[in-house]
Image (spheres, grey):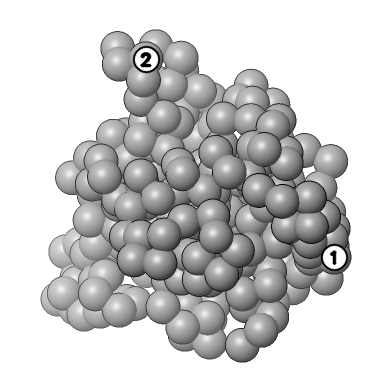
Amino acid sequence: MTQDLIQKLIFLAEQNEVSEFFFFFPSQFTRWYKNPSDCEIASFIAAILSFGNRKQFIPKIKQIFELADKSGGIYKWIKTSSFLNDFNSADSNNQKKFYRFYSYEDMHAFFSRIKLLLEKNSSFGEFVKKEYQTRLNKSEHLSQTISRIFDGCKVVPQSKTCANKRVNMFLRWMVRQNSPVDLGIWTWFDSKDLIIPLDTHVIQQSVKYGLIEKNAASSLKTALLITEQLKLIWPNDPCKGDFALFGEGVNSK
C-alpha cells in the first residue's frame, strides 16, 4: 500500500465520519432511543433489515419503532410481548410479507427470539457477551456468535462463509468508541477485532484501490482480506476504513 493511498483513505475516513453521516443511513436508528438497553436492540433490528433499497427499508424500520413506542420503547415492547399485537404468528395474515422475502411470521420469530434472550439476561448485550466469552470454539468471531444465537431464525444470516455484512455493521455501531456515528456502548469487545461490513460499495472501492482482486466474491474471506489491509492504516480500528470505502462509494452515486 503506497503512502499516497494511505493518505487518501485517511482523508476520506475523516471526511465521512461526521454526525451528518447517520441521518441518511440506517445508523440513524442507533440514536432513536437514549437507554442503552433500547439502543442495542433497536440497532440490531435496524441493521438486520438494512438491505435492498434505503427508500424501502428505512420506512419499514421506522414502522417497527413507532409501534414499539406506543408500548414504551423497543425493549419493553419485546420483553412484555406487546409485539404480538402487531406480529402475531396466529394471525391469518402471518404469511404476508413485511419486507422483501421476510414475512410477518418471520418477524414474529425474530422478536420472539430476542424476548427469549431478555428473559435469560438483563439486556441483549449482556446475553451476547456471555455467549461469546463462554463459546467452545475460540476461533468463532463475535458476528458468528450472534448468528449462532439466532440459529434457525430466517431473518439473521447463518452461513459461516458469508460476509455477514448486516451483523458486522451492527457490531461497528456497538463497539467503536469516540465516534460521532457509532455508539461504542459494548466496551467489552475490542474494535481491532471488528470485521468491515462488506457491501457492494466497499467491494467496488476496494477493487478501485487495489485492496482486493477484481473478481473477489462477497464473502467472509474477502471481508477479512480488506480488514487486514485496513489494519495497515488503523491497526486498532480497521473499521474506520468503512467510512473511507463505503462513504466514497455511496457519495459517488
User: Is 224 left or right of 160, judged from the image as shown?
Assistant: right
- Image position, residue 242 (x, y; %): 64, 56
Q: Check the image and report above or below for 27 versus 196.
A: below
Mark number, residue 15 = 1
Residue 199 or 81: which is nearer the viewer? 199
* Kind of residue at badge 2: Lys
List x then y, in percent, for residue 135.
35, 16
Q: Residue 247 falls in which quadrant of the image?
A: bottom right
Mark with earlier residue (1, 2): 1
State how far apart marks 1 and 2 are (Cα): 36 Å
In-front residue for pair 15/164: 15
Locate the C terminus and report the quarter of the image it occupies.
Answer: bottom right
Residue drawn at point x = 55 percent, y = 38 percent: 228
Instruction: Look at 37% across and 31% down and name the residue there.
Output: 145
- Determine whether 2 is above or below 21 in the image: above
**Circles 1, 2 touching at the beta carbon (< 8 Å):** no
Q: Nearer the viewer, mark 1 or mark 2?
A: 1
Front residue of this view, candidates 187 and 201:
201
Residue beneath disc 2: 138
Q: Image point 71% across, 30% down: which residue? A: 236
- State whether residue 166 appears in this view: no
- Residue type at the position of mark 1: Gln
Classify 10 Å Cα crowding around label 2: few (below 14), some (14-19), many (20 and above): few
- Which type of secondary structure does the marked residue at label 1 adopt? helix
Task: Identify the residue at image location x=73%, y=57%.
Answer: 5
- The answer to whether residue 211 is visible is yes
In the image, 200 versus 28, the foreground residue is: 200
